[in-house]
């Protein structure tokens, strides 16, 4: 992976990522660990939709959220869309964060994972700091390492938007209209497929 | 898809003021943000836009060079990931296949992400004819579907529609009132209306921004999130893509991403860049790879590079005539400059013919294109193909006959002399006074009401410039050209319609010490014929010009358009014969336009040498091709400031075409009129009373427009302006020499 501490300009990769996130109209936050994320999320909502893959990777997260008084909806197998259709806030883990563009690479192969990011209004994306890469080529490496395995990976950069009516920028179309990016500063993310 | 004939689309676009007002505002706004985005990219990458786009162009060219290999690799990987891949040759085959997939699934509702290929093949109409309801889910496309219209832009499909009309349309369809200024509420309506369709639909259709051979993935970029939902939610995903969308690797795709968002909407990256590899568990994925003329394009060296296109729409955003009529007239399904090229291959000559003359050959598109497609040259090649086909362009036959007469130097010269003498009573200050009785009548108004035609002088420049006829001009203190002989290439247009321009150029060169000769047999560089698609005639004229100037050392022309023709287009036209290309290049190496000769050539004049003390502010219209083809930026401005001491007020949109643009003035004069209007509006903002430029075509066009609109602005060729300062400059110089 092409992760470096500082880029050519001298500013740190994290600073540049932050600038990119903010330029894309998302909110940038740093939290030490999942416990802090839980506290932050629970303070803002009493129910959250969780991507099934995240629930499987971080079983402690479910316990912690519930302990914090936050209800959890994990899309069910039969009708995943219907089960999260009315949940406003969703929580996912990003595979990578790309400093160059302020994007978070989210991998969502299963329908259950997809409906979470697509149907919510406020999307919280959590990325461990060691998943921060400098340039888009870092994402290309991640994709290439998967060697053509089936998958659906999206570089997400800010809330959904349109300028189709008289080029006037409007935030929030089919996707979320609020995106919060949280970098986990003290924890290492669970290793996922494809990361070297 | 049945489209109305070009003439109808053109008339409808002209009749709709909203199109013009909206698009002009859009183009201006886009230009500023795109330029800033590209500049930021250049800084980020430490490389120029030209280097970056050359890299992406090479990637796309590399695919074409080994096309079947990459197609096979993509197909193999996509199939391995669980997709079914079908290659089709024609729109008919594509439609039939997609319809059968939808029918086999028993679906009667399909959701669609934005896809130009689906427009290319007329997919919606075909689905509807088979009882299937396609629902567009991109906001712009959805609005157009409700309005029963087609996209007028590759990226911003509904850019031709003002918010008032969209509000009224939504009100009518959804039975609620929408305030035109409340765009968020209109956007919300789309979300509410479409949400359940995504969930209810049996099939999701998408295009592809790239097909990545390395992994069998398709790349889809978007801002709204609708494409993701169309792709991800329904149990069947059908991708339709042109086979030119291939890139070898993910890293190559990222290079496309870097240029695409910035060139399309001035974003460093779109909100979603989705990489879809195979279907999700429980889903089917069908990928339809379409040829429809693409192989034929690849085999035709005149247009092959057009297959690099990444459909960013930049070539429309910088196009002045597009800003007047919009994409429903400027193009066919594909709009903007690229539409003038690829329509001939995807939709046939008939479809390609109408819009051809809308292009003013200003070259702005080639400057903006992120894959460096030589669009202006390609457009002229397609125009030639149209001219050679059975199909007629607007005013095609008339132009061909007129060009035939024009190509004959003697016949043309004689004709112009007759007109010159006969029109003496109508001549007023260089323009023709059209008799009042005629001026307001239909065709005369269309042709002249907005631009007074130039008067035909009794004597062409070549007569006045015969040896011994011209008074000796005052000598400048600096004599950089002492001992040099300059052959003046008059330009046919100036020679006959604006003789004072070459005469002024001759005086100026002599004032700087040159001996000026005017080769007698000279006629025309071939540009008008080339521009009209009559390449054989153009080639003859180029050859004649090359023969006439074969022995000349320095060739100077007061017309930058002739320089662009001789240096850029002539070698292209003669590309079949190596020795001719070489001679054309040699001639180009010795040929200058006036500003080039005075600033970079032997005629370099020292600072202040043409300063006569006059400090009346002037402004400069940059001849579009000088900026876009010859790569000239602010040379005229700097020269005026430094050498002539003139205060120069910057002209907004200085390098934008004035609308004269070759055959456009003749074939689609309404476009020339509106482009001129935009230029005159910019002139007004400078409040300068003198505008200077260095191309005679622009001068005649601007003068006509200034006169017809009653503005009090002097339009001068650089040579005319400078000659006006000769006396004062000479006196000044004497005063300063001890
Ligand atoms: S031709 Fe160039 S500028 Fe025009 S749409 Fe294609 S890539 Fe963009």
Image (cartoon, rainbow, N blue to C red):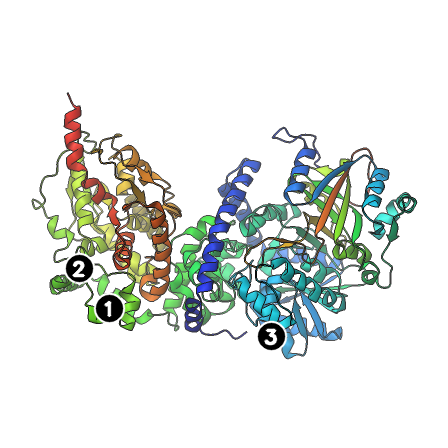
Pick out the residue farthest to the left.
Answer: B468
Label 3, label 1: how far apart the Cα atoms are: 47 Å
Label 3, label 2: how far apart the Cα atoms are: 54 Å
Query: Which residue is at 88% across, 45% downward?
Result: A65
Disc 1 on helix, strand or loop?
Answer: helix
Query: Which residue is at 70% across, 34% downward?
Result: A14
On-image quarter of the C terminus of chain B: top left
Indicate left or right for B731 with B717 as reference.
left
Query: Which residue is at 56% across, 51% downward?
Result: B265
Q: Is residue B664 visible?
A: yes
**Relative image position of residue B461 (x, y in whole percent):** 15, 52
The mark found on residue B439 in the picture is 1
Q: Is mark 1 within 8 Å of ligand 1?
A: no
- Residue carrying label 3: B125
Chain letter behind tag 2: B
- Residue carrying label 2: B456
B444 lies above or below B662? below
Disc 2 on helix, strand or loop?
Answer: loop
Labels 1, 2: one chain: yes
Label 1, label 2: how far apart the Cα atoms are: 18 Å
Disc 3 on helix, strand or loop?
Answer: helix
Q: Earlier in the sequence, mark 1 or mark 2?
A: 1
Pick out the residue farthest to the top.
Answer: B738
Q: Earlier in the sequence, mark 3 or mark 2?
A: 3
Please rate how many residues cluster around mark 3, counting C-alpha atoms within 10 Å: few if below 14, some from 14 to 19, many from 20: some
Q: Are marks 3 and 2 in contact (CB under 8 Å)?
A: no
B387 lies above or below B546? below
**Relative image position of residue B567 (x, y in whole percent):** 33, 47
**Relative image position of residue B442 (x, y in whole percent):** 29, 72
Q: Earlier in the sequence, mark 3 or mark 1?
A: 3
């Amino acid at each position: 992976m092409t992760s470096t501490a500082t880029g050519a300009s001298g500013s740190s990769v994290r600073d540049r990522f932050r600038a990119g996130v903010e330029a894309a109209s998302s909110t940038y936050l740093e939290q030490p660990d999942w416990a802090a994320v839980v506290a932050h999320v629970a303070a803002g909502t009493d129910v959250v939709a969780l991507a099934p893959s995240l629930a499987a990777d971080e079983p402690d997260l479910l316990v912690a959220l519930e302990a914090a008084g936050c209800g959890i909806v994990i899309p069910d197998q039969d009708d995943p869309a219907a089960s999260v259709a009315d949940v406003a806030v969703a929580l996912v883990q990003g595979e990578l964060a790309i400093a160059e563009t302020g994007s978070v690479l989210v991998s969502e192969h299963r329908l259950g994972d997809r409906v979470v990011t697509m149907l919510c209004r406020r999307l919280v994306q959590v990325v461990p700091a060691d998943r921060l890469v400098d340039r888009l080529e870092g994402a290309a490496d991640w994709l290439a390492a998967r060697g053509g395995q089936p998958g659906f990976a999206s570089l997400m950069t800010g809330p959904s938007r349109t300028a189709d009516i008289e080029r006037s920028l409007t935030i929030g179309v089919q996707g979320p209209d609020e995106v919060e990016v949280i970098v986990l500063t003290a924890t290492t993310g669970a290793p996922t497929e494809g990361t070297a | 898809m049945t489209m109305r004939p070009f003439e109808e689309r053109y008339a409808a676009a002209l009749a709709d003021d909203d199109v013009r007002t909206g698009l002009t505002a859009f183009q201006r706004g886009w230009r500023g943000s795109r330029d800033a985005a590209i500049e930021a990219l250049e800084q980020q990458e430490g490389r120029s836009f030209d280097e970056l786009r050359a890299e992406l162009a090479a990637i796309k060219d590399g695919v074409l060079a080994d096309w079947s290999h990459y197609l096979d690799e993509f197909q193999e990987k996509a199939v391995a990931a669980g997709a079914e891949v079908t290659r089709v040759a024609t729109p008919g085959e594509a439609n039939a296949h997609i319809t059968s997939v939808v029918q086999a699934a028993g679906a009667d509702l399909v959701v669609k992400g934005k896809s130009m290929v689906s427009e290319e093949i007329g997919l919606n109409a075909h689905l509807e004819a088979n009882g299937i309801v396609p629902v567009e889910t991109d906001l712009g496309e959805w609005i157009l579907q409700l309005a029963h219209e087609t996209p007028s832009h590759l990226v911003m499909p509904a850019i031709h529609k003002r918010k008032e009309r969209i509000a009224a349309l939504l009100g009518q369809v959804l039975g609620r009132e929408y305030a035109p200024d409340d765009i968020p509420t209109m956007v919300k309506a789309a979300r509410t209306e479409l949400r359940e369709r995504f969930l209810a639909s049996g099939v999701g259709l998408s295009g592809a921004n790239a097909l990545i051979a390395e992994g069998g993935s398709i790349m889809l970029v978007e801002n709204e999130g609708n494409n993701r939902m169309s792709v991800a939610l329904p149990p069947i995903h059908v991708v339709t893509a042109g086979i030119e969308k291939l890139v070898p690797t993910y890293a190559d795709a990222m290079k496309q991403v870097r240029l695409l968002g910035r060139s399309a909407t001035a974003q460093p990256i779109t909100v979603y860049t989705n990489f879809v590899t195979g279907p999700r568990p429980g889903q089917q994925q069908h990928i339809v790879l379409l040829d429809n003329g693409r192989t034929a394009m690849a085999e035709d060296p005149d247009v092959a590079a057009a297959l690099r296109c990444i459909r960013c729409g930049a070539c429309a955003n910088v196009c002045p005539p597009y800003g007047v009529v919009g994409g429903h007239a400027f193009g066919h399904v594909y709009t903007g400059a690229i539409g003038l090229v690829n329509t001939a291959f995807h939709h046939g000559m008939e479809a390609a013919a109408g819009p051809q003359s809308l292009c003013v050959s200003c070259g702005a598109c080639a400057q903006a294109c992120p894959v460096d497609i030589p669009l202006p040259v390609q457009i002229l090649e397609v125009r030639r193909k149209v001219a050679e086909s059975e199909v007629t362009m607007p005013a095609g036959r008339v132009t061909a006959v007129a060009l035939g007469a024009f190509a004959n130097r003697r016949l043309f010269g004689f004709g112009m002399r007759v007109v010159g003498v006969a029109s003496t009573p109508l001549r007023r200050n260089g323009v023709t006074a059209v008799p009042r009785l005629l001026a307001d009548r239909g065709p005369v108004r269309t042709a002249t009401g907005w631009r007074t035609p130039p008067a035909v002088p009794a004597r062409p420049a070549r007569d006045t410039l015969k040896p011994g006829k011209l008074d000796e001009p005052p000598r400048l203190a600096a004599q950089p050209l002492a001992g040099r002989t300059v052959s003046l290439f008059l330009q046919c247009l100036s020679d006959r319609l604006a003789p004072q321009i070459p005469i002024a150029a001759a005086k100026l060169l002599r004032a700087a010490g040159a001996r000026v000769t005017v080769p007698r047999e000279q006629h025309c560089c071939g540009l008008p014929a080339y521009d009209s698609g009559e390449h054989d005639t153009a080639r003859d004229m180029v050859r004649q010009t090359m023969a006439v100037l074969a022995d000349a050392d320095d060739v100077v022309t007061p017309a930058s358009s002739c320089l662009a023709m001789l240096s850029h287009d002539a070698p292209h036209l003669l590309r079949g014969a190596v020795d001719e290309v070489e001679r054309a290049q040699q001639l180009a190496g010795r040929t200058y336009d006036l500003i080039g000769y005075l600033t970079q050539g032997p005629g370099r004049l020292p600072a202040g040498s043409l300063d006569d003390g006059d400090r009346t502010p002037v402004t400069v219209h940059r001849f579009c091709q000088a900026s876009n083809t010859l790569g000239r930026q602010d040379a005229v401005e700097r020269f005026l400031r430094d050498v002539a001491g003139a205060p120069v007020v910057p002209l907004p949109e200085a390098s934008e075409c004035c609308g004269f643009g070759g055959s456009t003035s003749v074939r689609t004069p309404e476009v020339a009129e509106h482009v001129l209007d935009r230029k005159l509006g910019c002139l007004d903002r400078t409040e300068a009373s003198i505008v200077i430029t260095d191309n005679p075509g622009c001068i005649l066009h601007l003068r006509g427009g200034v006169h017809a609109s009653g503005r009090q602005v002097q339009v001068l060729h650089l040579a005319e302006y400078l000659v006006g300062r000769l006396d004062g400059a000479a006196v000044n110089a004497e005063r300063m020499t001890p």
